[in-house]
Amino acid sequence: MGTDNTQAAGKPGAKRPFRIWRGDENGGELRDYTVEVNEGEVVLDVIHRLQATDAPDLACRWNCKAGKCGSCSMEINGKPRLSCMTRMSTFEEGETVTVTPLRTFPVIRDLVTDVSFNYEKARETPAFAPPADVAPGDYRMQQVDVERSQEFRKCIECFLCQNVCHVIRDHEENKQAFSGPRFFIRAAELDMHPLDAKTDRKEYAQSEMGLGFCNITKCCTEVCPEHIKITDNGIIPMKERVVDRRYDPLVWLGSKIFRRGQVPQTSVTSGHSSGAVTASGAHGGAHSHAGGSHDTAAERQAQQGVNWHREVPHPTAPAVDVNGKLPLTELTFDRAAAPSPFGDDVTFPLPPEHLNFAHPQQDEPKH
Amino acid sequence: MTETRIERHHYDVVVIGAGGAGLRAAIEARLAGKKTAIISKSLFGKAHTVMAEGGAAAAMGNVNSRDNWQVHFRDTMRGGKFLNNFRMAELHAKESPQRIWELETYGALFDRTKDGKISQRNFGGHEYPRLAHVGDRTGLELIRTLQQKIVSLQQEDKRDHGDYEARIKVFSETTITELLLDGDRVAGAFGYFRESGDFVLFEAPAVVLATGGVGRSYKVTSNSWEYTGDGHALALRAGATLINMEFLQFHPTGMVWPPSVKGILVTESVRGDGGVLKNSEGTRFMFDYVPDVFRKQYADNEDEADRWYKDPDNNRRPPELLPRDEVARAINSEVKAGRGTPAGGVFLDIASRLPAEEIRRRLPSMYHQFKELADVDITKEPMEVGPTCHYVMGGVEVDPDSGAAYGTVRGLFAAGEVSGGMHGSNRLGGNSLSDLLVFGKRAGGHAASYADQLTSRPAVSVAAVEAAVETALAPLQRDTGESPYVLQQDLQAVMGDLVGIIRREGELVDALRRLAELRERVAKVSAAGGRRYNPGWHLALDLRNMLVVSECTAKAALERQESRGGHTREDHPAMDPKWRRVNLVCALDGDTVRLTRKPLPKMRSELISLFDRGELAKYLTDEELAEFDALTEEER
Ligand SMILES: Cc1cc2nc3c(=O)[nH]c(=O)nc-3n(C[C@H](O)[C@H](O)[C@H](O)COP(=O)(O)OP(=O)(O)OC[C@H]3O[C@@H](n4cnc5c(N)ncnc54)[C@H](O)[C@@H]3O)c2cc1C
Ligand code: SF4
Ligand code: SF4
Ligand code: FES
């Protein structure tokens, strides 16, 4: 319908500042744009307007523009979000909105990341096993019994939970052994399916999917746009029965964290006064669990949502050694794992004043 | 261009499209033992099917045991105003229940009735509660289930052959730009990977088109960027024909306010669950718009309509549940008469009809979506809705049983929204999801047996590939042309303003002239940037598809001088039985769209006898009625 011209209430758009990460796997930068924003618009609308005007080749994924397909995941002011569900009215007028790609997955271009990890994990997760002696059409299940699984089937595969989970966000090498929260709830869904014929879903999740790595920080639950109670309803019930029976790597991981945690947590110097923060090595800084249950202040803030009313920070460069290189091997590095591309002294979620993105392989010096 | 690398793949069956139809077709082809590729423009599991909310129609009779395939068939034909290909409607009505039950064996979890069966809900145009559903995210359940079935087949292959992708592989974010032929036989498909911009060639004797619809050519639409009519255009260029292209469905209740969510649909189940439409004067206006053909089934007063929710057997249905084209037209008339909202819609009110708790329980994702996107609380205030381009009934003309495309091409199959005929002039809500499953399976199966019976594999010619490369690269190599975004906007304006829900001869003629101008401009489009994930370039390539499909729609809309279902001519407001006997068929003659008339296949006698004479009298010509009378005479 030609509703376009009849909208009396839509104020003519104000120009608003945006910073968008542009680049590819070879590096890139945050670029500034000034874009018209109309009343009632979401971040994705603004990106579309940019494509139609200043940046025709700006890459981003989207499909439904209604929070149903999970394509448009990105980090907006550092917070993992669906851009089609992030209303512009949640930002201050005049506030710069910074849009960056998901951090946990390799960048393809601009806001598009390579999420194939998730599809690999999906493929490794054993499928539904139909009951042998029930013919199609004869399935009988009670609503109360399917509801638990139905909660998990609401998942739109936006992979925001996979993106925030520190087990892979901070530790690339864990990707091999860890399927991530999205697939823990897939396993849970099948475990709770009234007619699924496979009986060892929990054990499998523990032994093959890396369920034990999860230390229930609940960051995944916090970002889930479908409000699925990933941890409380999915992961914890899956852990419950197996944890005492099996060797749980969490115990092992926990002891390591504890040792490193001896060094008191250094608060990260606030970035906005000193320009780009160069993280100087990665000493100290307790391993962070991305806004989970360890830091009550952070948790409170995560629950309330990000405070949008703040000064815009400068981008954070990755942690490099004296030679200007990322310390990559275990021998030369002071931790038992590859460092976070964002610097191991950066805790997640970033303190609000650090919410900017710097590409890990950025070789160009920044402004 | 110094060199062009082209990745080559060999498959038995290539399925273009990873929505419900494509995935179901691929499953069938793989089950038939064929090496199968699935190609999709977006990521796996994100296709449009994900957005369907209401449900999948199948006459399982779980809620009302009087339902059966004959009733479903009747409803479908009625909804399509008897223009449907009767054989497709018949197959659909008969096979939908099996297709839905099959999904349960793949792991789907539908909402349940008290006795543990699949629950079914009411929906516009369906006589009995018929839509299998999962809250208001049925499409998501459908696509995820099929996606997971494919994964399970891949796990089997891994077990048997050591490789997940031994027999079925998904190529996501890959766009097909051209079908390649060997004489009149399909030989393969050519396209590019969105991610890298590199080209890819699939050599395959059988191709199934399952690319969905065309809504992106309209300004206000519920459709995503994927819906650029690629499959329609690919089929045309390969020598296949399109039918019923004048019929587009405008969903009656898309959001019109606020602007950012314009086009997003408010599921029909809001009306099925008691929501009512009111104009700016607060009148429940649908009672004024019940067409004569529906008087027997629809209430003419509020009391009866309201009683129906509790006692559907003894009351007529509320007029809010009329087929969607009737609702869309009614809203349009109210707005034109000056009784609309400031944003050009009407109010859809559920808040005053059900307790807040109940609304949240029955329509969780609607509630959510409005709250988060628009800050509107549907349990407290009415929604502002209006007609939105939603679905194209027209599509590839196919053999009803096999899904094989008509025209001059062999080895091409089509299923889902890209195919035409099944829904006639108007689709009933919920019939699409079951259509995808029924005809997806058929097309996949028949593509597999077609590939089997071939004695020689068709070969792809180098020249054709070179030509395809050149066409694909052209927009990047020009820097003098216009931006694809501007051209898209202009195209949307032409289609939205001149070939929209209400059509007039003068405007259609004007539209065709403007489309011809646009064609010149589109031929010279240029895209900035490189080949890697460049949406401007992708759009530039989609434009020519949108254009040719829009031409088909405009031409057919001009030709059909009557109003029926998804085609409303202000200058020919009535339905004309003579036009019911005609399908408009589009083919490509070189570059131009050629339109021909083709008689509709005649319904078999046992099918036509399912209707009362009184009802048929509204649709059939006197001649056809006389035939019907003779038939019933015989039976007596
Ligand atoms: C908002 C909304 C709500 C709906 N609600 C309902 C409902 O309740 N009930 C119902 O029955 N129907 C509903 N429909 C209609 C129904 O969802 C669609 O008609 C149906 O999903 C179409 O499925 P499909 O398999 O034909 O195509 P789609 O699911 O659209 O898939 C098309 C596929 O083709 C791919 N593709 C397209 N072009 C190319 C190309 N050039 N190269 C490679 N791949 C390509 C796409 O990437 C995609 O994977 C709704 C539609 C919308 C938009
Ligand atoms: S609870 Fe924390 S550790 Fe566990 S899966 Fe979720 S984000 Fe990862
Ligand atoms: S569980 Fe939630 S956050 Fe994770 S992929 Fe699914 S919808 Fe996204
Ligand atoms: S575009 Fe589909 S979730 Fe945002």
Image: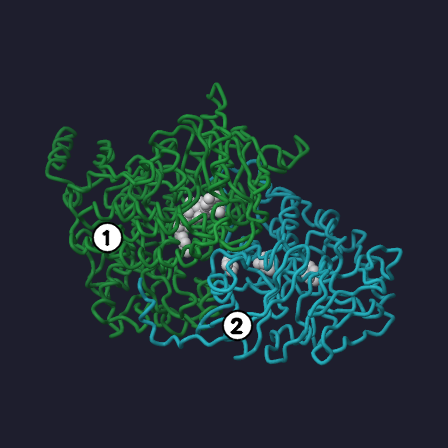
| Mark 1 residue's CB less than 8 Å from ligand 1 | no
- Could you tell me residue B631's position as x and y percent? 15, 31
Q: Chain B's colour? A: green
Vertical order, B211 against B113 (above or below): above
Q: Is residue B112 in sight in this rendering?
A: no
| Mark 2 residue's CB less than 8 Å from ligand 4 | no
Q: Residue at x 47, y 68 (%)?
A: B373
- Could you tell me residue B177's position as x and y percent? 47, 42
Vertical order, B212 against A321 (above or below): above
| Quadrant into which the C terminus of chain B falls | top left
Cα–Cα gap, marks 1 and 2: 39 Å
Q: Check disc 2 and report the residue beneath it.
A: A34
- Callout 1 amino acid: Leu
- Chain ID, mark 1: B
- Looking at the rendered structure, the secondary structure element under dot 2 is strand
Which label number is shown at residue B508?
Answer: 1
Of all chains in the rendering, the one displayed in cyan is A
- Chain ID, mark 2: A
